[in-house]
């Protein structure tokens, strides 16, 4: 599950550091965006007001403005507000993420063509896995993950790779032999959210050796599969090493 947004107390401490330049309306808007980022099912106006420590009249205009600007959407039946994809779109226009996706797109396309499986690129998004790029399988039959999709970090192989070596690693239970794989920067195991899929996830690192993304092949073995799992693992690790090298990073050692 995604981490909840910062508590009201934590937000107040941050705000107090620069009270001479405080912008109350902006603070309210950011509080709301941070809160809803961790609420996949959305919240009502009353719930939002309670969670950010305000009354409804204090946030009404802010909610209306965020909805008008396209950052929030409101369900007419339930009255719940959820984040739109506007922030995701902004993030993709941010040079570091855009550069990562651009550098990875060619190798990802080559990987998908070689193993005849789709592959995707995931990053840590506030304690959850966010899919930021995807290359479709050239095969007539396959499995793919939508760009923009968000998953719990503790229940995915991608999340385990992203969390390895961090405080979040304790929340990602591992099976026999998986710790050794993660120590080498990769993990292959059955998908815990979709039966019949084996996820092959490999770390992509920057020049400091930090994991900045994970390349994942959601492998589906069918009568159409012409490449076995071991070959997919080797190809995915080689591709992740290539992307890491393009970033000036330190790739995980391939066997």
Image (cartoon, rainbow, N blue to C red):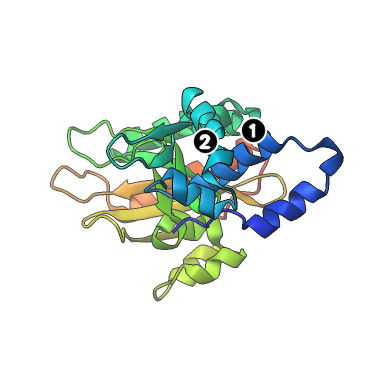
Quadrant occupied by the N terminus: bottom left
Question: Would you identify the image quadrant in which residue 230 lies?
Answer: bottom left
Q: Residues within 10 Å of mark 2 (few under 14, many from 20)?
A: few
Q: Is residue 58 above or below residue 39?
A: above
Q: How crowded is mark 1: few (under 14 residues within 10 Å), some or many (20 or more)?
A: few
Q: Taking the image as drawn, is residue 190 in sight?
A: yes
Q: How many marks?
A: 2
Closer to the chain start, of discs 2 and 1, is 2
Front residue (pair 228, 125)? 125
Rendered image quadrant of residue 146: top left
- Name the element at disc 2: helix
Residue receiving disc 1? 96
Label 1: state its secondary structure: helix
As drawn, is 9 to the left or to the right of 253? right
CB atoms of marks 2 and 1 within 8 Å? no
- The answer to which of 213 and 207 lies nearer the viewer is 213
Mark 2 and mark 1: Cα distance apart in space: 34 Å
In this view, the residue in front, 228 or 46, is 46
Left or right placement of residue 25 versus residue 43 in this view = right
Locate residue 220, reporting x and y percent: 24, 49
| Identity of the residue furthest to the left in this view | 223
Q: Which residue lies furthest to the front in this view?
A: 57
The residue located at (57%, 45%) in the rendering is: 34
Q: Residue at x 62, y 40 (%)?
A: 28
Q: Position of residue 103 (x, y in %)?
A: 56, 30
Tell me the residue at 21%/56% (across/down). Answer: 196
Name the mark on residue 60: 2
How far across and how far down the image is residue 214, in percent?
50, 48
Residue in the picture at 31% in, 58% down: 191
Q: How far across and how far down the image is residue 45, in percent?
A: 45, 43
Question: Given this view, does label 2 or label 1 mark the residue nearer the observer?
Answer: 2
């Amino acid at each position: 599950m995604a981490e909840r947004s910062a508590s009201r107390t934590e937000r107040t401490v941050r705000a107090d550091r620069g009270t001479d330049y405080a912008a109350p309306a902006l603070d309210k808007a950011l509080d709301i965006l941070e809160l809803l980022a961790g609420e996949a099912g959305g919240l009502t106006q009353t719930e939002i007001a309670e969670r950010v420590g305000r009354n409804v009249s204090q946030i009404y205009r802010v909610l209306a403005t965020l909805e008008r600007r396209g950052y929030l959407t409101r369900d007419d039946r339930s009255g719940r507000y959820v984040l739109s994809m506007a922030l995701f779109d902004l993030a993709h226009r941010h040079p570091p993420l855009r550069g990562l996706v651009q550098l990875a797109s060619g190798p990802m396309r080559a990987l998908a063509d070689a193993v005849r499986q789709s592959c995707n690129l995931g990053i840590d998004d506030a304690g959850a896995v966010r899919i930021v790029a995807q290359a479709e399988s050239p095969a007539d039959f396959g499995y793919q993950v939508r760009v923009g999709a968000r998953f719990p970090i503790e229940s995915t192989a991608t999340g385990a790779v992203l969390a390895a070596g961090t405080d979040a690693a304790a929340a990602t239970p591992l099976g026999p032999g998986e710790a050794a794989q993660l120590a080498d920067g990769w993990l292959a195991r059955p998908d815990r959210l979709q039966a019949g899929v084996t996820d092959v996830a490999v770390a992509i690192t920057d020049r400091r050796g930090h994991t900045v993304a994970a390349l994942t092949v959601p492998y589906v073995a069918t009568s159409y599969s012409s490449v076995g799992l071991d070959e997919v693992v080797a190809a995915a690790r080689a591709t992740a090493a290539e992307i890491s090298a393009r970033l000036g990073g330190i790739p995980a050692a391939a066997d």
